[in-house]
Amino acid sequence: MRPVIGIPCYSGRREGTGSPLFGNNQTYVRAVQRAGGIPLLIPPHQDAEALEAICSRLDGLLLSGGCDIDPARYGEEPIPACDTPQPERDELELALAAWALDAAVPILGICRGMQLLNVACGGTLYQDLAIQQPETDQHDHSATIRTHRAHGIRLQPQSRLSEILGTMPYDVNSLHHQSVARPGERVEIVGWSPDGVAEAMEIDGHPFALAVQFHPEELEGDVEHPDEPSRALFRAFVEACGERMAR
């Protein structure tokens, strides 16, 4: 049997008709499939009974990229550079993150997912690096192709992520304008960009709760130059989900 991994959806509108839809990028789905998992897309607007039923069927949780988290979720007023929030998505993902943290369910956070996991643990975010941390380099390279290697990252030796990705210099893509400010409870920052921005984190005491600020789902799916460290990250995540399923 293969582990079932939940991927929360966002709300949107279909181009042309404007019909409402729920969805997420196919790159997350395909990365999970390539690593041996079964992706399950989870739409917002779940009542407590439905959410409990969904969680009972999950062996892992992937928190994906997307729009900014409502600053009210970490006790701040939004600045103008902050996205218009999607309250229903924040509510769903924070509920799923709390469940996975409590139940020791494997978690992989990507970009917004790293920020969401930190907020779920009581941490805060920089709402816009260019405004609140002007000494940092540009991190939002969303105008370029999504596989563009924008900068290197440095990983903490002996961390779980360094075991998976390796300790050699590693260049990553960068599609974000926010980042972790104050780490939440049990959050350990284990990766940094050259300018000191948090690029990776782990949850102390959890069997597998890792998050990265870059987008490994785009790098591992690069047809011409598939990224082996990114594929190794998804394999490690799905393997952890499989171990939980077996238990």
Image (spheres, grey):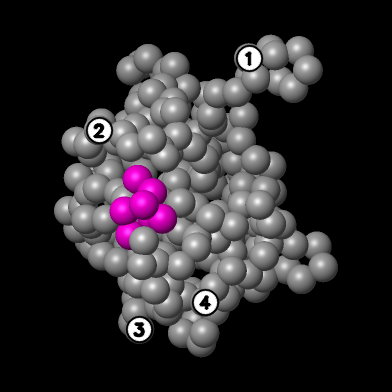
Q: Distance between the residues labelled 4 and 2?
A: 32 Å
- Residue 60 visible to the viewer: no
Q: How crowded is mark 2: few (under 14 residues within 10 Å), some or many (20 or more)?
A: few
Say which element carries label 2.
loop
Residue behind mark 1: 20
Q: How crowded is mark 4: few (under 14 residues within 10 Å), some or many (20 or more)?
A: some
- Give x and y (percent) for residue 34: 69, 56
Q: Is residue 80 above or below residue 180?
A: above
Residue behind mark 4: 152
Q: Nearer the viewer, mark 2 or mark 3?
A: 2
Residue behind mark 2: 77
- Give x and y (percent) for residue 47: 37, 14
- Give x and y (percent) for residue 68: 43, 38
Q: How far apart are marks 2 and 1 (CA)?
A: 28 Å
Say which element carries label 1.
strand
Q: Is residue 143 above or below residue 225?
A: above
Q: How crowded is mark 1: few (under 14 residues within 10 Å), some or many (20 or more)?
A: few
Identify which amino acid the numbered label 4 is placed on: Gly
Give 196 or 242, whichever is nearer the viewer.
196
- Give x and y (percent) for residue 62: 48, 46
Comes first in the chain, label 3 or label 4: 4
Q: Is residue 132 magenta?
A: yes
Q: Does the magenta stretch include residue 26?
A: no
